[in-house]
Image (cartoon, helix red, strand yellow):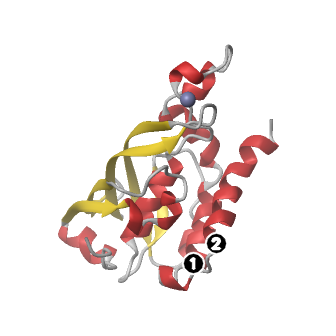
Amino acid sequence: MARMDAIDVFEMARRGSVTQGVLAFAAMPRLAQSLARREGTLAYRCAGGRDHRGRPALDLRIEAVLPLRCDRCGEELDLVLRAERSFFFVHSDAELAAVPIDESAEEALLGSARFDLAALIEDEAILQLPISPRHPACLAPGEATNASPPADRRRPFATLAGLRDRLRRASSAPRAAVPATAPATKSAGRRKPRSGSA
Ligand SMILES: [Zn+2]
């Protein structure tokens, strides 16, 4: 299960090609740091094409059972993750900056002939993680909101789309070149607005 090679997303969109497979949790260190165990895999399917505006696009589907740790009792907890996302690609930073951050389902990404698809997949899995994973039986009275489905959790992250794109652009170098401290900083940055605005 080797690391997924970088791909030419514009070529993938033009040909309408599909790539699918599995990624080991162990190959996704930023995700793995939130997991109770590193054994296991995440299934993905990426389909290139054009969106409704004719832009080069990618439909991503990911599926996994993530072993998390319950925040209350400390025991393992399986999260069934299933997500589908649509992206479209732009050719330059300037073009990306000109894309308004809105509530639309598609997210703009800076495309590349050497796009790190594995990093995108890992990002999407991380976005699906609950802030405070807990067994249903471990919820204290009045804490039922912690069990809200992923769809409800996405909205707080909508404003972070821009931040994420900036981070992605800043770290467009191969993953190996990213300092070891980067994942923690990035993760904390994502979660900050949730607690800060309460
Ligand atoms: Zn628990």
> Looking at the image, is 52 positioned above or below residue 24?
above
Q: Which residue is mark 2?
A: 182
Quick check: can you spot residue 51?
no
- Depth check: give the residue in front, 157 or 144: 144
Which amino acid is tagged 2? Answer: Ala
Asked whether the residues under the numbered discs 1 and 2 touch, taking CB atoms below 8 Å apart as contact, a structural biologist would say: yes
* Dot placed on the residue nearer the N-terminal end, 1 or 2: 1
> Looking at the image, is 191 positioned above or below residue 163?
above
Mark 1 closeness class: few <14, some 14–19, many ≥20 residues within 10 Å: some
Which amino acid is tagged 1? Answer: Ser
Q: Position of residue 169 (x, y in %)?
A: 57, 75
Residue at 63% x, 58% y: name it: 187
Quick check: can you spot residue 142?
yes
- Depth check: give the residue in front, 149 or 100: 149
Point out the frontmost of discs 1 and 2: 2
Quarter location, residue 53: bottom left
Apparent side of residue 24 relative to residue 29 in the rendered image (left or right): left
